[in-house]
Image (cartoon, rainbow, N blue to C red):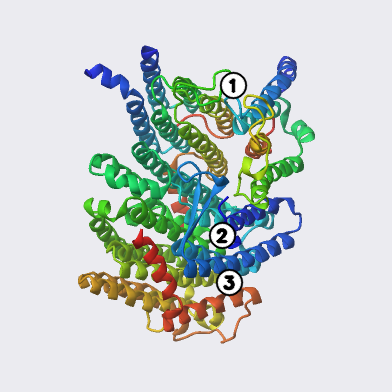
Amino acid sequence: MNAFELFVANIHFLGAVIIFVIGLYMVIAHPNLMKRIIGINVMSSAVFYFFVAIGNISGGEVPIVNPEALTPASFINPLPSALILTGIVISVSITVYALALMIKIYQAYGTLNQDEIAELMKKEADL
Amino acid sequence: MIPFSWLELFPVLQMSLLVLMALAGPLIPSKGVVKGMHLVGLTLLTISAFIVLNYTHTSGPFAFQMGGYERNIGIELLIDSFSAFFAFFVLFFVTLIHLFSMTSLNLDTPASQHTAYYSLLSLMYFSMIGILYSNDLFNMYVFIEILSLSACGIISVSRKKQNYMAAFRYLMMNTLASISVMFGIALIYMLTGSLNVSIMAERLVELYPMYPVNVSLSLGFIGVGLAIKSAIFPFHVWLPDAHSSANTSASAILSGVIIKIYLLTLIKLLYRLFTLDVVIDLRIPVVMVVLAGVAMLMGSAFALGQKEIKRMLAYSTVSQVGYILLGFSIFTWGGLVAAFFYIVSHAFVKGLLFLTAGMAKSIHGIKSIKATEGIGYKIPLTMMLFTVGAMGMVGIPGTSGFMAKLQLSLAFMEVSRGYLRSFLIISGVINALYFFPIIMNSFFQEDNKEVFKLEKIPFAMGFTLLMFVGIIFALGLFPGLLLPYLEAAAMSLMGS
Amino acid sequence: MDNRLLKTMVQLLLPFIQLYGVFIILHGHITPGGGFSGGAILGASLILYGLTFGHQETEAIFPEKVSAWAESGGAMMYVLLGLFGLIFGASFLSNLTAGFAAGTPGQILSGGFIPLLMIAIGIKVGSTLMTLFSALIEGEPS
Amino acid sequence: MTFLTIFLVFLLIACALMVERTKDLLSAIIIFAAFSLVLSVLWLILQAPDVALTEAAVGAGITTVVMLAVLAKTERYER
């Protein structure tokens, strides 16, 4: 197997890890709350991508029973898909909840920048 | 079908009842009915959990297959001495707190939020006992997510400015941790091809020598994720805000059980999934000792510098997590028992402290340590109960805190690592340093102008506080009440 | 906002979107998709309605009370379906062993209680998404 | 097929990078929707159609709409 084939065989894993790192950077380095929420979403998407890539085998079929041909060659593993559906549900609920909190924070402090919010909170605590 | 005793249906019925209570809450217009329903439900659950505990104690562990599928396909609940004991402990603790919150909630939470608060709490209990019972890694992850989301909801329920930011930070850190845990699960699922913890452990024994990098990466991701969630020292940054801004009963629950659930999950996975050989081969015990020692010293040091009582208590939780971790980190039977004892003891002691500090804050408006001057005359009962809590925390003989520390040092002596006791002593001294000024301030003020007068504590709150004090002294004087269960729990972790 | 073109287009499109959502829910056990995807599409259609016609009109056709009942009811239906298995001597959430009819694979009436679960999830998800959305834009002058 | 996959993965990474770089939150959200869409096509290639369907409905649809609705009530530019 030459280098290119190895690269193609593992491209999904590589892509998932790169996106994971980009998402992590987004969460850690950006003080803007909206950016951090998007970063969380990017990160979880990367993990879901990784999970789906685990379940895939080349040349496999979608794991849905076809009444015409009941003897398929090989189904791919359906478990990761089921898990990812659960994961997507959770990630959406986290996103919406974080957005709701963000609106309240904006109404309270008038900014979305975490550093500025921290300063405002410090001032309030000193008063 | 396999014949099974009807007692083995209890765990799934408990979880169903909790979900149904959480869902029925918003449909009931009367708040009193909601509170009563939760009280009755939780009492029933505690009794049933006690029955299950005794059942596992006498006739051994049992498993429950969801949907009747095979264990490598379906979701499996495994109820053994470990999970049954801690499920009972969680339910017992929260029932007491629920009794307290029935009156205290009127003082510190807007009335429109009460129903939502109780629904979130039920969802939280559901996920907590779910984490303990579940023997399926992904299912455990889902419960962890539900737990952190509902805990965030609990923090933001008071509808105050600082709560929103605290909840947002908590949510961000916890989601990062969850994603990290999920990545770890993906890595190990890739290797073993199953999600049942027992099956994975069997396969890992063969697979570890072949793919050590995968296993250690997965252990790292899961470990860091759970360390963030259980606020082990360098990852504790979200904790002080979250725990100090929550309302009285919520901070007792957050500090008393939720942190412990994550610690127990970590321990459960280290023992059951990765097994002891792998853990020792990867030098996890050394990492844990170092983290625990740093947490104990730094948590206490930070607590010393706080101006607000509840923030101080929150930082003290950071150091107490270090104690528990130190007990786990020696990976012996005695260490496990001691750490379990510490978990139980700390829940009641810290619960008592948070409840009394919360009462001082919400009823009498006393927030900062400076404001405690002379309040021993104004609110003597509250401060006396606070003193009992502080005694338990410092470890005065007779309280459960002392017994827990004794157990820990005995466990260290057993493996001839007595030098670890120096951590206990130093941290204990710092503990005393930050608790006694409050007590001295409040009771032994020279020129007080207040008239000594007993304040009134509402019945439900007083009953809960008395129960807490009783349990603290009972555990301190008769540890034999609890130890058989803890020994069985530790045995069930070590045995597999 | 008063845009007649937009409103007419949405009124025309909405039935089809909702029909598609219901289709996805009901065919969850024989084609890709299921309760969550279909529920999300249903929720999206309601959100679309809310965005074009404003908060008040959405409240009129989909009151908060209905939404609360749909949310709790959908999830409760799921739990009760799970307990159904326990009553009939099988396990929690058991399907065929609890006496649900299997049917012929590939037809709508197959898969035991999976379609029922899908309907429960669809109701829950659709109404929850709508509630969350209206909670987010509540009180906005539209 | 292989080249489509490689192209899509690179597009995905480019989308993620652009979401990270752009200062305008409105564009960031729109690019994030594109990211979700590319991801759902990739999942279709990876034989997971139900996940792809859900991601297209949720990631590209609902999440984007909700984020935009929230952005309308807060500020548009990152400072």
Q: Residues within 10 Å of mark 3 (few under 14, many from 20)?
A: few
Q: Position of residue D24 (x, y in %)?
A: 46, 26
Does residue B496 appear to the left or right of B470 in the view shown?
Answer: left
Say which of marks 3 and 2 sits in front.
2
Query: Are the residues under badges 3 and 1 in a single subunit?
Result: no
The quadrant where residue B81 appears: bottom left
The answer for which chain carries disc 3 is B
Image mark 2: chain:
B
SS assignment at label 3: helix
- Chain bearing mark 1: A
Which one is in front in this view, the residue at disc 3 or the one at disc 1? Answer: 1
Q: Are marks 1 and 2 on the same chain?
A: no
Name which of mark 3 and mark 2 comes first in the sequence.
2
> Mark 1: which secondary structure?
loop
Nearest the viewer among B36 and C123 is C123
Task: Give the amino acid type for the residue marked by disc 2 in the picture.
Answer: Glu
Q: Which residue is mark 3?
A: B364
**Residue A87 relative to residue B295: left or right:** right
Name the residue at 28% across, 42% down. B207
In the picture of the structure, the residue carrying the numbered disc 2 is B8
Q: Which mark is residue A67?
A: 1
